[in-house]
Image: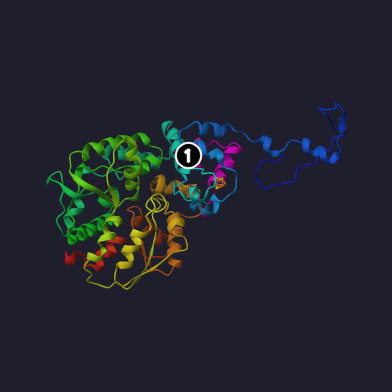
Amino acid sequence: MPVGGRKQAPDAVEHERATVTSTVSGKEWELPGMWNRMFEQRVIWDYTTDGFEKIASLAGGESLEWCYGCAKCVPVCPVDLVGEYGPRKIHRKVQTGLDLFTSDDLWLCTTCANCLRVCPKEVDMIQIMPAVREVAVGEGRIPAELQEVFEKTFRYGNALGENPRRRHGWTRDAGVPVRVLPSEPGPVDVLFYVEDYWSYHPRGQDAARAFARILASLGVDYGILGAEEKTIGDSQRLAGERGLFEALMEDVVATLVHYEFKRIVTPDPHGFNALVKEYPKRGHTYEVLHYTQLLAPLVDRIEWRKELDLTVTFHDPCYLGRHNGEYDAPRRLLEAIPGVRLVEMGRCRENGYCCGGGGGGMWLDGFTANHTSERLSERRVREAVESGADVLAVCCPYEVSRFEDGAKSTGNDGLKVRDIVELIDEAMGGAERA
Ligand code: SF4
Ligand code: SF4
């Protein structure tokens, strides 16, 4: 009897004789051969529920077994577009004996939420994957490159393993003063939570400096935490290190209590997601904005000095768009920049394609390469090129380096990748103006 794979007609088994007995009259009825086939063992009897029971016993793991196989999730799964994936396929594999706890499939989901958007049964990979990963991490079964990031985050408070004292090194070349609150205390309107990639990655630092210049020209009263800032670590949580995330949360909250601010603004949709969704579950509630949400209402006050003459397409970050519903603020900013013509890619807004960086994917490119035909970021770069854009605009700190690498590796060096603040800053006159 075949199990799984393509549908096949079952082998007919003709019983010589089969009867049923009426429960009313006690009379025996002989069944004709064609009906006897119903007594043959069917494929469904060969399924096992063991895998589902193990996953469903975890908080958050319950929904995998709710799948009824409609397959709506597969064509929207970004990983399936470059490989074989999607909740239905995972469900089927578990049904036919896969141990998800030890399988490489466990690490391929980027928790992008596009499947959850379309799933009629609300099979929730954003809960399932972190729950199963947490067990795998606890048992030491974890890709080496991810383990390294967890260790760096634990030791240094950032995923890059950089010296915390160099967190605000980028401010030196910003061209405007940046208030570092531990050395210049006092109340501020905005606490600018810089996060790791804008603090340390050279291309992230470019964006941080551009943002500082924009804030200065708009007269925003803000400060940063400098060496006292630690990553919020939401991607580490989704990659299975909830314990590390919660320890970081305690540190972050203990630091924030020393400072007076009205709202937190961050460029990182992952940190943003945790601050608005995870922190309140522990009673830590702040007013939190993504940087595009701070700037969009102020856009009419910006003094433009240059027309850019660029066709720009925009990549929606999964954790700003699908996870938190913000699609308009980034577009409002881009449309306001003189000389920018905004064009959309086929997959955008609610159906935006994932860059591959979410849910720990940021640090799993080597591991993922063994399971996919190309990186998700490479796929997205090709979509951006097809849109006819000169520039792929982003507003998540993971994405500039991911897409710049993708542009090089796919031979699309002509496509420029820019954070939205870099474009705004350029049209405002850039560092020379500051
Ligand atoms: S959309 Fe939901 S119910 Fe349908 S196959 Fe996918 S996981 Fe199963
Ligand atoms: S969350 Fe995204 S990557 Fe994960 S299975 Fe769903 S669609 Fe695929």
Can the viewer see residue 370? no
Q: What is the magenta segment's predominant secondary structure?
A: helix
Coloration of the structure image:
rainbow
Task: Identify whether 247 is placed above or below 77.
Answer: above
Residue drawn at x 54%, y 47% as measured from the top left: 120
For this rendering, which residue is in front, 53 or 278? 278
Can the viewer see residue 232? yes
Residue drawn at x 83%, y 41% as measured from the top left: 34
Q: Is residue 390 left or right of residue 100?
A: left
Q: Position of residue 175 (x, y in %)?
A: 16, 60
Q: Position of residue 371 (x, y in %)?
A: 50, 48
Kind of residue sitting beneath label 1: Ile
The residue that label 1 is drawn on is: 128
Secondary structure under the numbered disc 1 in the rendered image: helix
Farthest-out residue, top: 26
Q: Is residue 92 magenta?
A: yes
Q: Is residue 58 left or right of residue 203?
A: right
Task: Identify whether 88 is placed above or below 296.
Answer: above
Residue drawn at x 65%, y 46% as measured from the top left: 5
Give the magenta range. Answer: 81-106
For this rendering, which residue is in front, 187 or 162? 187
Quadrant placement of the N terminus:
top right
